[in-house]
Image: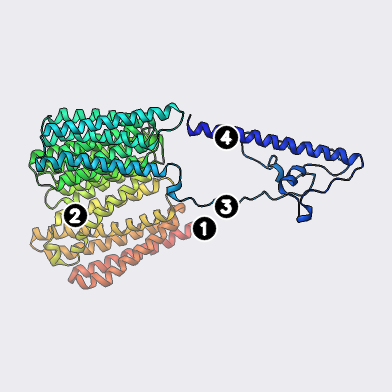
Amino acid sequence: MTHRDDVARLEVEFADAMQRMYAVGNGLARLRVDLDREGHAAPAPVGAATGGPDPALRAAASPAAPSGREARPVPPPAVGGPVTGADAGPSAPHAGGPALPPPTGPALPHVPWYQRDGAVTRALAVAGAVVTLSGVAMLLVLAVRHGWFGPGARVSAGALLAVLLGGLGVRGGARDRSTGGPVGSAPVALVATGAAAAYLDVVAATTAYGWLPAVPGLVLCLVVAVAGLAVARRWASELLAVLMVAGAGSLAPVVVGRPGWLLSAVLGILALVGWWAGAGRRAPWLTVTRTVPVALSLLAGAGVGSGATEHRALLLVALLVLGTTLATSAVSVRGDADDLAASAALALVTVGTLAVGSAQPGSTRTLAYAVIAVVLLLAAAALSRPPAGPVAGHLVVSVATGGAVAAVLAVLDGAPRGFAGTGLLALALGHLAVAAGSRSRVALGLGAGVSAVALLGWLGHPVAMVSAELATHHDLAVAALDSVLAAGVVAVGWWAASRATELPVETRRVATVIGWVVGLASTATVLVSISTLVGERLGGPGTGFTTGHALATVTWVGAAAGLLLHSLARPSTSDLALRSGLLLSAVAVTKLFLFDLAALDGVVRSVAFIAAGLLLLATGSRYARAWERVRTRT
C-alpha cells in the first residue's frame, strides 16, 4: 500500500465521520422543533453562563428553524469534493440563525527538520553513501599509488562490495514494497552505493588497469549503469538515481586520473542512462546531476594539451553527447513544457562542445563549428513545427542560440583574411531572411543578435570615410561590399520586423530608425569608397573622395524628395513618409554645412550645394502642386 492509498482511505473515513456528525445535528434540530410545537421551552444551551454556547453544539443546533417552521436538514458534504457555500457545514448561513464564523484551530507548531518523518534516515543514508563511495575510490586509486595489494584484489574487493551492498538494498526494498509502503531511504542508499561502486570498478578496470579495451569497457559501463538505474526506475526513486549518478560521476575523474575522451565517454553514458531512469516524470535534480559532470569533463578535456588524435576523439564524443542531450531534452520538454532543467542541460553541453571545437587544430576547428551550427539550427527549425514540434519556447531558444553562436564562430574562424565582417553580414542576412519567412519572434531575435555583432564590425568602414587619408589607406573594395550587405541587412530586418507576429509597436519603430541610420551611412560609404577607388585608378584619389561625398549628399536629398512626394501619393503611410522625408532633408542639409563645406573644395563643393539646392526647390514646388490637387479633390 502506498502513501496515495493511505490518503484515499483517510479521506473516506473523514467523509464518513462528517456525515455522522451532520446526522446527529439534523436529529437534534428535528427534536427541538417537536418540543417547540408542544409548547415546551427550549432548554438553555450549555455554556450560556460562561459567555456563549460551545461552538460544536451551536454548529449542531444552528440548522433548526424558528418556532412554527419545519426544520431544514443540513446536507452532508460531497465526499472528496470541495466544500462550497451550499454544503459548507455548520458555519454556513441558514434559516435557523445568523451565520457563524468557521472555527479556527491553533497554528501548527514548527517542526525542526531532524524531527520530520524520515529526515534522519535520509541524512544518514546520504552520508553513508558518500563515505562508502569515497572508500571505494581510495581502494581503487590510493592502493595503486602505495602498492598495498595487486590490481586483481582491488577490483575483486570492489566488485564484491558492490554486489553485497546492492543485494542488501534490493532485499530491503522488496521487503518494504511487500508491506504496501514506499521503499525506505536505507535500501535506496544501499542500492545506489552498490551500483556506483560497480560502475567505478568497471571504469578502473578499463582506464586505470587497462584490462578491458575502450569499447568493451564502455559497453560494460552501459550495462552496469542500466542495471543499477533500472532499480531506480522500477522504484520511481529520484533519490536513488541522484545518489548513484552523483557518486559515480563525481568520483570517476578521480579513478580515471586525467581528462580526455574516455572520461567524457564514461560520464556521457552515465548522463544518458540517468535520463532514462527519470524519463516520464520531472526530475530536475537528476537532470543537473547527470549533466554537470560530462559538461565539465568536456571543458577540462578542451583545456588539456594533447595530440591531434586525442582532440579528434574528444570532439567525436562531444558531438555524440550533444546529439543525445538534444534528443533527450526534446523528449522531456514535449512531455513537460515547464521542464527548464532540460534546456539548461542542453546549454551546458553546448558550451562544452564549443570549447572542444575551439581546441581542434587548423581547419578542423572551423569544420567543428560548422557542424555544431548546422545540427543545432536544423534542430531548432524542426522543433518549431510539426511533426517534431512545436515544443516549449525555452528549448527552441536554447537550441537556436547555441547554433547561432556556433555559426558566428565558424565564420570568424574560417573566413579569408579581411572578409570576416563580410561573412558575418551574410550570416545575419540569412538569419533575418529565415525570420521573415517564418514570422518567428525567436528567429527574429537571433537574427537581430547576429546583425548587431555584424553591424558593430561594419562600423569601421563608415568611420574610415570621414577623411581622405583614412579612406585611401582602407580596404575600399571590402568596404563597398560590406556596405551593400549592411544595407541589405537593415532592409530585410525591417521587413522581418513588419511580418513578425505580436511584435510591439515600439520595437518596430526602433527597427525603422536603425534601418534609416544604417541605410544612410551605408549609401554614403558605398559611394565614397567606389569614387575613391575610381580616383585612385585615375591618379586623383582626393578628387574621387570629394566626388563621392558630394554624390552621397545629393542622393540623400533625392531620397528625401521621393519620401515627401510618396506621402501624398499613399495616404495610408503619409505620416511616416512625411516625417522621414523631412528628417532626411534636415540631415542632408546639415551634412552640407557641417561636413561638405569643410571637407570638399573647389568645383565639387559648389556642384554639391547647387544640385542639393535645386533638388530641394523642385521638391518644394512639386509638393505644393500635389498638395493643392489633393486638397481640391477632398
Nearer-the-camera pick, 186 or 60: 186
Report, in whole angstroms, how far the alpha carbon at label 1 lies from the one at label 4: 86 Å
Q: Amino acid at mark 1?
A: Thr
| Disc 4 residue type (three-letter) | Leu
Percent across and percent down for residue 621 are 39, 63
In this rendering, position of residue 242 left or right of residue 1? left
Residue under label 4: 10
Q: Is residue 247 above or below residue 224?
A: below
Alpha carbon separation for disc pair 3 and 4: 22 Å
Q: Quadrant of residue 435?
A: top left
The secondary element bearing badge 3 is classed as loop
First in sequence, mark 3 or 2: give its number.
3
* Coordinates of residue 289 in the picture (x, y in percent): 30, 42
**Residue 497 rendering spot, x and y as whole percentages:** 37, 49
Residue 380 lies, with reference to residue 539, above or below; the image says above
The earlier-in-sequence mark between 1 and 4 is 4
Of circles 1 and 4, which is in front?
4
| In this view, the mark in front (3 or 1) | 3
Q: How far apart, in angstroms, are the residues tagged by discs 3 and 1?
A: 81 Å
In the rendered image, which residue does mark 2 sit on?
480
Query: Alpha carbon of mark 1 to alpha carbon of mark 2: how far?
Result: 46 Å
Q: Which residue is at the front of the view, 445 or 191?
A: 191
**SS at badge 1:** helix
For residue 25, the mark is none
Question: Which amino acid does the dot numbered 3 rest on?
Answer: Ala
Pointer 3 and pointer 2: residues touching (CB < 8 Å)? no
The residue that label 1 is drawn on is 632
